[in-house]
Image (spheres, rainbow, N blue to C red):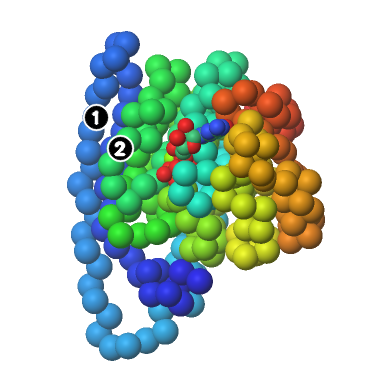
Amino acid sequence: MCVECGCGTAVPFGIKVLSVLAPGLLRATSAPAAPAPEPPAKAVDLRIPLLAKNDRQAAQNRAEFARRRMLALNLVSSPGAGKTTLLGRTLDEFGLTTRCAVVVGDLETDNDARRLARSHAPVAQITTGTACHLDAEMVAKSAGALDLAGVRVLFIENVGNLVCPAEFDLGETLRVVLLSTTEGEEKPLKYPPIFKTAHIVLMTKVDVADALGFDRKLAAENVRRIAPQAKLIEVSARSGEGLADWYEVLRAALPPA
Ligand SMILES: Nc1nc2c(ncn2[C@@H]2O[C@H](COP(=O)(O)OP(=O)(O)OP(=O)(O)O)[C@@H](O)[C@H]2O)c(=O)[nH]1
Ligand SMILES: [Mg+2]
């Protein structure tokens, strides 16, 4: 796990808010990186304090999202499973009638935020530097930098990683884990913690399943075995398969306005 593999210590991060002023024109403002933390004076077990601190901030995030009557979703997957592509299409379709915002985390670059920039949806990029997961403080600061007036759904695209994000509650309403057909059917069996915490599992890129020899039925069985609590939806952000079900789940989960 993250805190055991040593990557769970606090690191400086950056936030960039992108909003479209006119077609093709992006405005970017950078928040200064948070100061580097003091190194611990002696070797201590940081796991409990680190996670306890994160859990406190996550509880504050959750209360703030509830106060705003906002649905917050934490999208987690291995790198390249299709999070940004799915979010782009979701903003273009579901996002036309329901106001959405996105915060997206990557180690470096604002590439994903630029891909997601739309005039009707505020977007912020978090650059985590070396951290392989988002934490609750990063989400609080980046969401706080956005104009959330009227926003009903906040999508949080986590750093591509199937391991460490499992331990970090962001205060989300629902955790969405993506499993793409390019990864193999056995991923839920190999990385159970993240699947066990999922409310929704999206099997992505099903348009190329046959070409890849990916067995959708076996993958679905593996998801159900490890994550019987999760709703499974098979989707393609390319062909559009399953997206109506995804939008319906989002609609059903919206808190009353
Ligand atoms: N065939 C197919 N390709 C897809 C689909 N969704 C995404 N891709 C492709 O998969 C690649 C990765 O997609 P991204 O959306 O960038 O994945 P990501 O999970 O956001 O990646 P990271 O942010 O780097 O973790 C891109 O080349 C996409 O075009 C899909 O539904 N079908
Ligand atoms: Mg992405």
- Left or right: 188 as drawn, with respect to 109: right
State whether residue 4 appears in this view.
Answer: yes
- Left or right: 242 as drawn, with respect to 98: right
Checking the image for residue 231, the label placed there is none
Which residue is at 38% across, 51% downward?
A: 138
Checking the image for residue 28, the label placed there is 1
**Amino acid tagged 1:** Ala
Which residue is at 45% across, 24% downward?
A: 121
The one of 256 and 142 positioned closer to us in this rendering: 142
State whether residue 74 appears in this view.
Answer: no
Q: Position of residue 110 (x, y in %)?
A: 30, 37
Q: Position of residue 74 (x, y in %)?
A: 55, 46
Element on which disc 1 rests: strand
Q: CA distance from mark 1 to mark 2?
A: 10 Å
Element on which disc 2 rests: loop
Which quarter of the figure has residue 211?
Answer: top right
Which residue is at 73% across, 44% downward?
A: 216
Which residue is at 27% across, 80% downward?
A: 40
Disc 1 and disc 2 in contact, CB within 8 angstroms: yes
Residue 140 lies, with reference to residue 4, above or below; the image says above
**Amino acid tagged 2:** Asp
Q: Quadrant of the C terminus?
A: top right
Instruction: Report which residue position mark 2 lands on.
Output: 110
Ranked by sequence position, the earlier of labels 1 and 2 is: 1
